[in-house]
Amino acid sequence: MARPDRAAPGGAHLDTTRRSRASADDDAGVSGEPAVADQGARLLALYDRALPQVYGYLLPRTGTPAVAEDLTAETFLAAVSAVQRDTVPDLTVAWLVGVARHKLVDHWRRRAREERQLRAVEETVVPWEDPWDAHVDAARAREVLSELGPHHQAALTLRYLDGLSVPEVAEELGRTVHATEALLVRARTAFRRAYGEEDDDAG
């Protein structure tokens, strides 16, 4: 038998079933939305200050304004996606530069696949020589670096420009520490050879 409506003062009746259903519908979908909206507003407010720093990080590492602009755009698109998924641990310029670093590594990986230059590093024992004692001209070093293969460029940039430790470079490149050490030895050899050839040409 259907439950009668509850009487209200003055003889009116209240449909309690309808009120309960409406209250439940009103609460649906509210959880999480304010936090995401707040993060989105923070990202928008941070954009003007972060843009030159993200671009400034990428430009000297790519050597090409067009590539740096593309990677900067990819960085902010990734940031927007992370905000929408509510997966941003700490929305700061430093976090955005970290996203840019990942985009830079992805770029080198794409180049390596396109040029078919990415090869497995032989698992051999290689003498580890670090830090690099040679003095090089910064401007010419960047020019030489941009002419190396993508895997060599990635390893040297992360190790010497970004100042990451060898284990950190290995993590960024998805390699073992031993393979990364071998890659860095090969990369430094390739760099010295190219740098020396430029010296010979200049002379």
Image: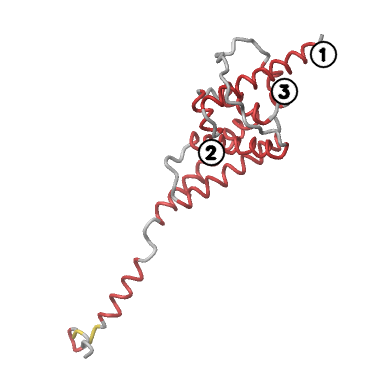
Residue beneath the point at 49% across and 26% down: 167
Question: In the picture, residue 184 is in which quadrant?
Answer: top right
Q: Earlier in the sequence, mark 1 or mark 2?
A: 2
Instruction: Tell me residue 51's x, y (percent).
Output: 58, 38
Q: Residues within 10 Å of mark 3 (few under 14, many from 20)?
A: few
Q: Amino acid at mark 1?
A: Asp
**Cα–Cα gap, marks 1 and 2:** 39 Å
Q: Amino acid at mark 3?
A: Glu
Instruction: Tell me residue 138's x, y (percent).
Output: 66, 17
Q: Residues within 10 Å of mark 2 (few under 14, many from 20)?
A: some
Q: Is residue 172 above or below residue 126?
A: below
Residue at the disc numbered 2: 99
Q: Specify the farthest residue to the bottom.
A: 1
Relative placement, left or right, of 102 versus 197 is left
Q: Comparing marks 1 and 2, which lies closer to the viewer?
A: 1
Q: Amino acid at mark 2?
A: Val
Q: Is residue 167 above or below residue 69?
A: above
Residue beneath the point at 35% across and 69% down: 26
Residue beneath the point at 80% across and 11% down: 200
Residue at the disc numbered 3: 143
Element carrying mark 3: helix
Q: Comparing marks 1 and 3, which lies closer to the viewer?
A: 1
